[in-house]
Amino acid sequence: MHKGFLKTAAVFGALSVILGAFGAHALKDTISDHAIAIFETGVRYQFFHALALLMVAMLYKDLGGSLLKWAGGLFITGMIIFSGSLYILTMLTALVSPDYKWIGAITPIGGMCLITGWLLMFIRFMKIR
């Protein structure tokens, strides 16, 4: 197992539950439904990819290799950029001004990291005999 990925997956998983609860209880009455939807997308992707990172961490013991390390690193990077940009976009839209939509242009970079992580896992799985 990859202990660093295990620990990171646990932290990101816990944060996704905390942020989900925060969005459901603290934000629901203070920001628009559109901003809530953006926030919830960030939470959902963070949670799914925390689970994916957990899977990478557990598979690393048996499969090893640089592809899984890259996949795990890309999942971490993707969660930070993808979900993080959505959290920032939500807060700026709700608290400052809706004119900060340009922050959403960062989100696809995180999405590409997440997709690439999945593709690297696929490539690694194709090498299993």
Image (cartoon, rainbow, N blue to C red):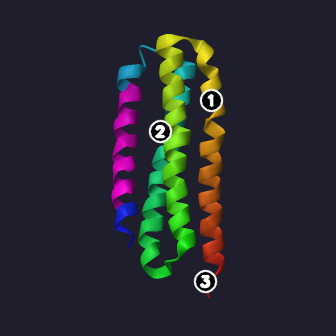
Q: Give the number of the disc on residue 118.
A: none
The quadrant in which the N terminus is found is: bottom left
Helix, strand or loop at label 1? It is helix
Q: Residue at x 65, y 63 (%)?
A: 119
7 or 41: nearer the viewer = 7
Image coords of residue 108 (percent x, y):
66, 40
Q: Amino acid at mark 3?
A: Ile
81 or 62: nearer the viewer = 81
Specify whether residue 45 is painted magenta. Answer: no
| Relative height, residue 86 to residue 28 (above, below) | below
Image coords of residue 124 (percent x, y):
61, 74
In the image, the segment drawn in magenta is 6-24
Neighbor class of circle 1 (other Cα within 10 Å; few <14, some 14-19, many 20+) is: some
**Image quadrant assignment for residue 51:** bottom left
Tag 1 residue: 104
Q: In whole angstroms, how far apart are the C-alphas of marks 1 and 3? A: 38 Å
> Which is nearer the N-term, disc 1 or disc 2?
2
Q: Amino acid at mark 2?
A: Val
Q: In whole angstroms, how far apart are the C-alphas of marks 1 and 2? A: 15 Å
Q: Amino acid at mark 1?
A: Gly
Helix, strand or loop at label 3? It is loop
Q: Is residue 109 left or right of residue 27?
A: right
25 or 120: nearer the viewer = 120
Magenta stretch: dominant SS? helix
Question: Total of numbered circles in the picture?
Answer: 3
Q: Give the number of the disc on residue 128.
A: 3
Q: Give the number of the disc on residue 43.
A: 2
Q: Residue at x 59, y 59 (%)?
A: 117
> Which is nearer the N-term, disc 2 or disc 3?
2
Helix, strand or loop at label 2? It is helix
